[in-house]
Image (cartoon, grey):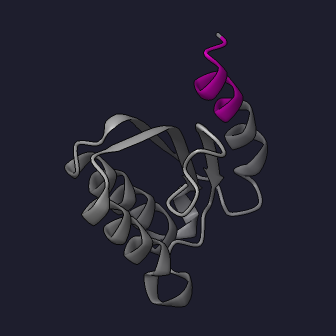
Amino acid sequence: MFSRPELFSIFYAGSPSLWWDKGALFNLECDYASKHTDLKATIFMTAGEKEGDQMSGNIGKMAELLQSHNYAGVKVETCVFPGETHQSCYPASLMRALRVLYKRP
């Protein structure tokens, strides 16, 4: 999304490891923001409540970061599934992603 944004316009990140490599994805986003004013992307990120702040907090942080840059064309939505763990939130997360990203009821 940040290194070759022309490849895709729809992104689903279920319990993404945004903390990986000392937050490398946050750094990629900041580098992208320094050179671009648009990002043609619809992004849906999810986590289970019981995954803790490392997951749910980071998806909120990434969503806020993306929105704070006021990219033309970006749409960001997040969902934290109450009472769910990393493993148990996957089915609900995937089904919600399909509805959100493909505009199905």
Give me the residue at 57% from left, 68% from top: 51
**Foreground of the two, 26 or 95:** 26
Q: Specify the quadrant that holds the N terminus.
A: bottom right
Specify whether residue 81 is in view: no
Picture quarter with the C terminus: top right
Across and down, in percent, residue 19 comes to: 50, 79
Left or right, 68 with reference to 26: left
Q: Nearer the viewer, residue 75 or 57?
A: 75
Residue 64: where, in percent of width, then height? 28, 53
Q: Position of residue 11 (x, y in %)?
A: 61, 44
Q: Is residue 31 left or right of residue 88?
A: left
Residue pictured at 27% horizontal, 47% vertical: 37
Q: Is 12 placed left or right of 1 in the picture? A: right
Relative vertical location of residue 40 with respect to residue 99 in this rendering, above or below: below
The quadrant holding residue 44 is top right
Residue range corresponding to the magenta coloring = 96-104
Picture quadrant where residue 50 is located? bottom right
* Res 92 quadrant in image: top right
Prevailing secondary structure of the magenta residues = helix
Q: Residue furthest bottom?
A: 22
Count all numbered tags in the image, as a single digit: 0
Residue 33 sits above or below residue 98 on the image: below
Residue 47 on the magenta segment: no
Which residue lies at the image location 59% right of the left edge and 72% below the top edge? 17
92 or 59: nearer the viewer: 59
Q: Position of residue 67 (x, y in %)?
A: 27, 46
